[in-house]
Image: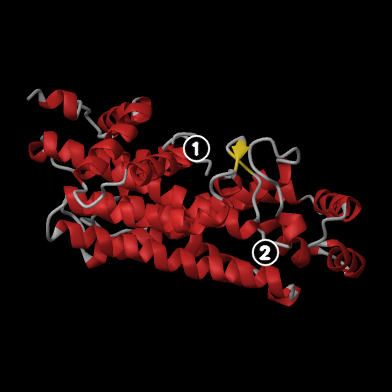
Amino acid sequence: MDQSRILPDGNDGIEKSVSFSKEFVDNFQTIFPNIIDEALSKICYLDSRNIRNRIKEMTVYYTLEKKPKLGELMLYAYAMLEDREAWNEEKRHQAYLLACVIEMGASYFLFTDDIQDDGKIRFGKVCWHLLPDVGTLAMNDACLLRSFIQELLQQNFSEPLFFKIMEVVNKIYFLTAMGQHMDVTLERDRNFDNFTMKCYCEMNEMKMAFPILEAPIMFALILSNRATKESMQQIHNICVDMGILFQIQNDITDFYNWNGLTKSSTDIQKGKCSWLAVKALELSNEDQRRIFKECYGSCDPTHVYKIRELYEELKLPQIFVQEKEARYKTFFRKINELPPGCMPDVKFYQKLFKLIEKFEI
């Protein structure tokens, strides 16, 4: 086995991380379906061709429409953490498979999110639950996908690695569900006194920061046999602010995606507790707050326009730039305060930043 093909040389770790993760991204359209087909062929109790085809169809429907950024992040981190002597073909396969599982997990949450938000368009095509042969089967499909993820992991990881991975997977499910509960109840109750930055950050720490940023790095730690209670806690402490920033960027994207060509833009109409809404309530004077309360959460185009106009009047897009820079500074302050000899170390986070600063979820 030519080890250089598995993990290319790199003096500072960046080259090998970029090369390894880039290989996955460049070949994802082939790697992912092959892994799914292999896993389906191994399920001895699955005789129904229709169900096999259904699982295959739902796993690729969203997953192959997007760049595998979470998988890329995991592989990027893993290549920096793993000892070169430990690399072999099995490790490479496990790393790619785990990256695919992360992408499938993201698709699972997109399914459920679109159902709850009554989404119409995702990645420029009709949402899964609106397809003619889906409808009320959408939730069962989501359950199938979630169960298939565990099946895939069981096929490819033995104890104790499997249980360590599943511990993070289950935490993703639990935290995301709690964050989604907060999201839905805040939208439903329309009590704008609860639209606070504290509440917003708490919600998105659970439904965005952990599954999107923290968990992929934790998987890299587990696969490289560097996961400890201290290292896992450190990941959370360092990355939580950047993870919340991803959701803020999502909210900004929703604001600018007015034509809804790639994803339905519904935050204003649904009355979502978005960063823009929270910030608007923080900065509004009495008259502006009255307009917000009268118009926010309405599908009336006139009301939607007034909210968008209010956001522009309050210069929220410009304030977002300041928010972004502040969170970057917090990230670097935290890593510079890390003690010597910690794992991951300062250099790991410095290199990781080169990837996550370009993230668009």
Relative to 92, say whether 159 is above or below. Answer: below
Secondary structure state at the residue bearing disc 1: loop
Relative to 238, say whether 43 is above or below. Answer: above
Q: CA distance from mark 1 to mark 2?
A: 25 Å
Question: Which quarter of the figure is the N terminus placed in?
Answer: top left
Q: Residue 120 versus residue 165: which sits nearer the camera? A: 120
Q: Residue 110 versus residue 147: which sits nearer the camera? A: 147
Q: Nearer the viewer, mark 1 or mark 2?
A: 2
Q: Position of residue 214 (x, y in %)?
A: 38, 56
Q: Residue at x 67, y 64 (%)?
A: 273
Q: Residues within 10 Å of mark 1 (few under 14, many from 20)?
A: few
Amino acid carrying mark 1 in the image: Lys
Task: Report whether residue 336 is seen.
Answer: no
Q: Position of residue 45 (x, y in %)?
A: 22, 52
| Left or right placement of residue 116 versus residue 345 in this view | right
| Left or right placement of residue 360 versus residue 73 in this view | right
Residue bearing the label numbered 2: 273
Relative to 95, say whether 222 is above or below. Answer: below
Which of disc 2 and disc 1 is earlier in sequence? 2
